[in-house]
Image (spheres, coloured by chain):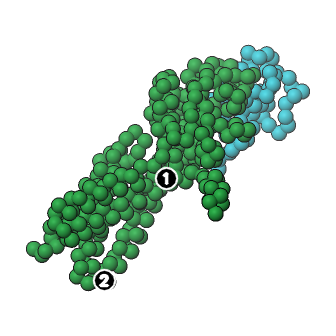
Chain colours: A green, B cyan
């Protein structure tokens, strides 16, 4: 056994543990099942290995060995492709699809989490070799803390206020508050819609939020998450029963119309507030003004 | 090929008001019109929209 055996083992174990920790499964996530998990834990293990051996190779002045990190980059870009392809395929068979923006967000998260694992293992081994195992453990705690911070994004509740409105019909037009949702012709369908439908108005808290919730991908993510959590009154062959989100052009509010199987207003509100703000949907038009003012 | 944003059929009680170039179902009264629309909606997998009280169209979205 060389002097590097324990530091390397330590780095790999902590790195893999971080990946498992970051692979928490909840209702909106993929993978939900064992095989999906195995893939990601295995890739996390490889990532941990790559991050760990970087330090000994620097200490041994084997600088060419560092180039294998470029290998890691291309390896994990494939993870993103794999996730994107799988989710896109599955999306065709969802009653309420996730939407491309949401899928891209999930795929990016999977890729970046592997880099967080590399970073964690790197720091752990560094801590172990520079000080002792205690240094390694402290480095691990710091790295896991940073990873947790980096991996959790914002929630919709931070940028919008959610308010319940009962959907109503004005002639054949379905409205949530004053926002037009769609035209439903048949009285029979209208009855169903009023019976199961729920309406919510998302009121943006600032100008940046207005642009973010205007994004179609973000709106689809809301519909998907709510339908996933509360069920959806819908089937193939009933295209009239479809959850929709439309925008008020005057003030940027978004009217969300959903058809949950469980009509619980408070629960639905909480779920909407917990919907992640998608990285790809976030807009910050005000940021430029702020920078100009600072100058 | 997927058809999108296309009027698949029109159902009416007033033959003067129907568009050209589309399958039209003439009905005697509102009740019959609603019955046919319900069936056609299910068959054609489109959404029944009401334009006026006398005219429904089925649209594929």
Q: Is residue A36 visible?
A: no
Location of mark 2 (residue): A63
Which of the pair B27/A30 is nearer the observer? A30
- Identify the disc placed on residue A97: none
- For label 1, count other residues whose C-alpha is less than 10 Å away and answer few (under 14), some (14-19) or many (20+): some
In which quadrant is the C terminus of chain A drawn? bottom right
Q: Residue at x 63, y 19 (%)?
A: A191
Does label 2 or label 1 sit earlier along the sequence? 2
Residue at mark 1: chain: A
Up/down of A69 relative to B28, above or below: below
Q: Residue furthest left?
A: A1
Q: Residue furthest right?
A: B16
Chain holding disc 2: A
Residue that badge 1 annotates: A105
Examine the image and state in which quarter residue B54 appears: top right
Quarter occupied by residue A5: bottom left
Disc 2 crowd, CA 10 A, few/some/many (<14, 14-19, 20+): few
Q: Residue at x 63, y 24 (%)?
A: A167
């Amino acid at each position: 056994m060389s002097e590097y055996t324990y530091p390397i083992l330590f780095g790999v174990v902590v790195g893999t543990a971080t990946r498992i920790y970051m692979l928490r499964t909840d209702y909106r996530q993929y993978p939900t099942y064992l095989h999906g998990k195995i893939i990601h834990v295995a890739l996390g293990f490889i990532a941990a290995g790559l991050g760990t051996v970087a330090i000994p190779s620097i200490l041994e002045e084997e600088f060419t060995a560092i180039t294998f990190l470029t290998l890691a980059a291309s390896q994990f870009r494939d993870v993103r492709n794999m996730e994107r392809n799988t989710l896109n395929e599955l999306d065709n068979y969802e009653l309420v699809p996730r939407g491309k923006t949401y899928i891209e967000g999930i795929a990016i998260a999977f890729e970046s989490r592997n880099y967080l694992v590399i970073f964690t293992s790197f720091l752990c081994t560094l801590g172990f070799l520079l000080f002792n195992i205690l240094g390694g453990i402290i480095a691990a705690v710091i790295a896991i803390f940073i990873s947790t911070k980096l991996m959790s994004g914002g929630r919709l509740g931070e940028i919008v206020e959610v308010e319940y409105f009962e959907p109503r019909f004005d002639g054949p037009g379905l409205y949530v508050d004053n926002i037009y949702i769609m035209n439903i012709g048949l009285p029979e369908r209208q009855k169903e819609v009023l019976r199961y439908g729920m309406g919510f108005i998302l009121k943006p808290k600032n100008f940046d939020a207005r642009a973010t919730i205007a994004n179609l991908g973000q709106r689809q993510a809301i519909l998907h998450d709510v339908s996933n959590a509360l069920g959806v009154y819908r089937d193939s062959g009933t295209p009239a029963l479809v959850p929709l989100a439309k925008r008020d052009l005057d003030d940027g509010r978004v009217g969300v119309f959903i058809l949950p199987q469980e009509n619980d207003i408070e629960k639905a509100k909480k779920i909407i507030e917990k919907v992640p703000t998608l990285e790809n949907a976030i807009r910050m038009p005000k940021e430029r003004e702020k920078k100009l003012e600072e100058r | 090929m997927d058809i999108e944003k296309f009027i698949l059929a029109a159902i009416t009680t007033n033959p003067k008001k129907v568009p050209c170039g589309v399958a039209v179902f003439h009905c005697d009264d509102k009740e019959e019109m609603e019955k046919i629309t319900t069936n056609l909606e299910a068959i054609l997998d489109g959404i029944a929209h009401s334009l006026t009280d006398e005219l429904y169209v089925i649209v594929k979205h």
